[in-house]
Amino acid sequence: MRYFVAVADELNFTRAAARLHITQQTLSAQIRQLEKAVDVPLFRRTTRSVELTAAGAAFLAELRWVPAAIDRSVHTARRAAANESGVLTIGIGEGGALTLTEPILAEFRSRHPGIRVDVKVYSYADPSVGLADGSVDVAYLRLPIDGGDWLRSETLFVEPRVVMVPGTHRFATRDVLAAAELADEPIVGHVCADRAWIDFWSLADHRDGKPARFVGSASSVLEEVQCVGAGLGCVVTVASARWVPPVGVALVPLADARGSELAVGWRVDHHTEAVRAFVAVARAVRDANPQTVYALAHPDLNDRSIPPTIPVIHSQSP
């Protein structure tokens, strides 16, 4: 059913397969099996287009929310079982919370030794870092995302956005750039469907309605470096990209673009005792290390040395 909804949304098998992270051949086979099961054609296919049949449109209207409901039911059951056994599943997005990531995890384990911590790592393909479908209990993530009413978060710090350009680009020697100067530049985008995320990292609010010209996509900072180093275009990225070995690229600060919030996020419908405990620990580690937080929020782009992990605090549980 998920495959059918994806194709119905995209009306393109290639895009739907990319969205589902499967091959186009697998997707086509699954749709054929579904059509055989319901005994009616759901799509009208030509070499140039894909359209819903009348039967397909009616089928979609009934099934639109079924996959999400099934996912929520499955993950709710798994979370309930995990809570009974003392397990907290933490999602870590690209870069996590940088040098606060491990200290928070270590402090949580110290305060709550009876809770087993499972970690899932996510790329830019899922900016919600597993929260949207309930795969994780809590996550290190970057904002903004299309969180809607279900998302709650605690900001750890705000990291500046920068522009990564090829080393031979005319902007490579600039000390600073205004966001509007990138309006006509080809942009390397991200592999995801989150509109708030795409708009933020393509500087949509600085384009006066002019769409970005995307020339590729990346799912990690390393892939961004590779794409830009190959001369595909430039990319709006995080200041911590300076910690990735530069391959023919330069990083230039943006003077007028707000930074990206690094936060701990959770679902409003899953604010368990374990989640509350983790958020409290994250807040405590952040507040106990103001100098580190300041350095993360005000980075020196010329300093490419990765800083040591900050000391772990061992205060009493609240």
Image (tube, grey):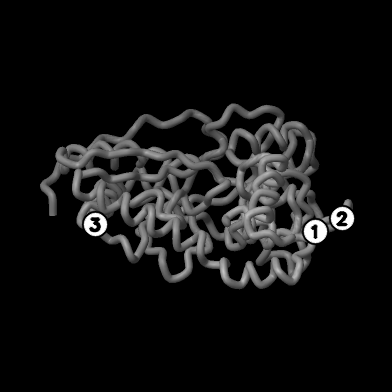
Closer to the chain start, of discs 2 and 3, is 2
Viewer-side residue, 316 vs 267: 267
Please give the label number shown on residue 50: 1
Image coordinates of residue 34 in percent, x first then y, are: 64, 53
CA distance separating discs 2 and 3: 52 Å
On the image, which quarter does residue 179 sit in? bottom right
Residue picked out by circle 3: 276
Q: Residues within 10 Å of mark 1 (few under 14, many from 20)?
A: some
Q: Residue at x 26, y 47 (%)?
A: 82
Viewport quadrant of the C terminus:
bottom left
Q: Residues within 10 Å of mark 2 (few under 14, many from 20)?
A: few
**Amino acid bearing label 2:** Thr
Q: Residue at x 37, y 47 (%)?
A: 293
**Amino acid bearing label 3:** Arg
Does the rendering let one see residue 190? no
Mark 2 residue element: loop
Image coordinates of residue 43 in percent, x first then y, are: 75, 60
CA distance separating discs 3 and 1: 46 Å
Residue furthest front in the image? 39
Q: Residue at x 20, y 40 (%)?
A: 313
Image coordinates of residue 134 in percent, x first then y, are: 40, 54
Residue picked out by circle 2: 46
CA distance separating discs 2 and 1: 6 Å
Closer to the chain start, of discs 3 and 1, is 1
